[in-house]
Amino acid sequence: MNATAEAAVRQAVEGFRAVHGGEPAGVWAAPGRVNLIGEHTDYNDGFVMPLALPHTTRVAAARRDDGVLNVHSADVPGDTVRLHVAKLAPGVVGGDGGDGGTGGWAAYPAGVVWALREAGVFPGESGRAAGGADLYVHSDVPAGAGLSSSAALEVATAVALDGLYGLGLTPERTALLCRRAENEFVGVPSGIMDQMASACCTAGHALYLDTRDLTCRQVPFDLAAEGLRLLVVDTRVQHALGDGEYARRRAGCEAAAAALGVRALRDVPYGELDSALARLADPALRPLVRHVVTEDQRVREVITRLDAGETRAIGPVLTAGHASLRDDFAVSCPELDLVVETAVAAGALGARMTGGGFGGSAIVLVEEAGAEEVGAAVTDAFAAAGHRAPRLFEAVPSEGARRLDR
Ligand code: GLA
């Protein structure tokens, strides 16, 4: 354990003791992510390439044998939320009152327990003793910043419960159960990218993932060795996927796939894009299809470049991806556009929004020598435009979900 992990474990253990009394059986962690390329492709069965951030959500946990789930977050003011595992249902979190509503943060851990119960793997099913847990949550993944704080909370909860009860979950199964929690229990129609990133990423790599069959490849992504940096710029414009715009894009893509007679937009070959667009009667669907099909192609191009050792050449592909998200998919915002324009003008190799959009964060690929200048240019441009100061940090490709106290 390094010093940072040690401090995080100590904090989680002390927090657990203060809130729940007694000792946790362990401390587990799951990271947030940025996505390098492949945006809004995951619910179209397409390709993505996320990497895990060093920022994690930690869960200190202990078993209970009374079917009660007590969840406490150090990051959200309020009391411990007490829930009954057997009563959990979408829309009915099953608490004793307090902040147990499906809209609250507790819906994420509760949704994971519900998904495990529905899958028949949580103790209490099939005549086993009623399982429960005391959970203490603490996170440094910025919330609402498009960096997958929700997936980090879900996956950290799942790996903690797996650790407590020996559920034998693979990382892929963990990701699928967590997505089910988010889709069906919390009610956000997200794809599988964020949960797979949090569960499966490894340090020093980006995860090249086919979201149709979940096959993935760990792609070495050691920017420091090449004199490069990947900056994250959190615009601090709060993004919320639950507000309907994300769901509308997803519904539009599904309608377009149906109109084109394919299972998902991934099945429209890049070389047949123009004829597919011409066949679409509804003009509103065309830019959605153009984005998804060209974005899958950009993922292929990035993987080709990385495999050839031409990391710098991915810069323009990232910037082209931003233009597509801004102009065709219409999920950017003025602050994200300002990051990209300013960074590229200041000499960055490429930049794009990352995650769902409508606010949140952008990534910027820069030469190490120019990183400070590019960061300062973005900060100055925000001040000049009267925007809140953005938060900048480096994306160092980090480890996925793991037990932290061993
Ligand atoms: C959010 C969703 C993901 C993915 C991205 C856009 O992060 O949770 O499933 O759709 O938006 O690429």
Image (cartoon, rainbow, N blue to C red):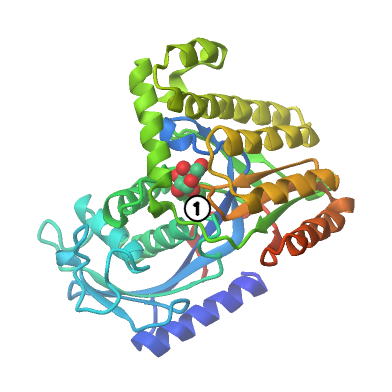
The extreme right residue here reads 369
Residue 223 visible, this angle: no
Q: Is residue 34 left or right of residue 227?
A: left
Residue 137 visible, this angle: yes
Q: Nearer the viewer, residue 54 or 297?
A: 297
Q: Is residue 224 left or right of residue 83?
A: right
Residue 339 at what x, y percent from top left?
71, 51
Read off the residue under disc 1.
Answer: 198
Residue at 85%, 48% in the rendered image: 346
Q: Secondary structure beneath disc 1?
A: helix
Q: Nearer the viewer, residue 321 or 337?
A: 337
Residue 105 against residue 213 in the figure, above or below: below
Other residues around mark 1 within 10 Å, as few (<14) / some (14–19) / many (≥20): many
Residue 27 at what x, y percent from top left?
46, 71
Quadrant of image for the N terminus: bottom right
Query: Of the residues shown, which amino acid type is indicated by label 1?
Result: Ser
Whether ligand 1 has any atom under 8 Å from the Cβ at mark 1 is answered as no
Residue 291 against residue 10 in the figure, above or below: above
Residue 282 against residue 92 in the figure, above or below: above
Residue 173 at what x, y percent from top left?
36, 46
Residue at 71%, 64% in the rendered image: 386
Q: Which image quadrant is residue 283 in?
A: top left
Residue 313 at what x, y percent from top left?
78, 32
Count of numbered circles in the view: 1
Q: Nearer the viewer, residue 112 or 295?
A: 295
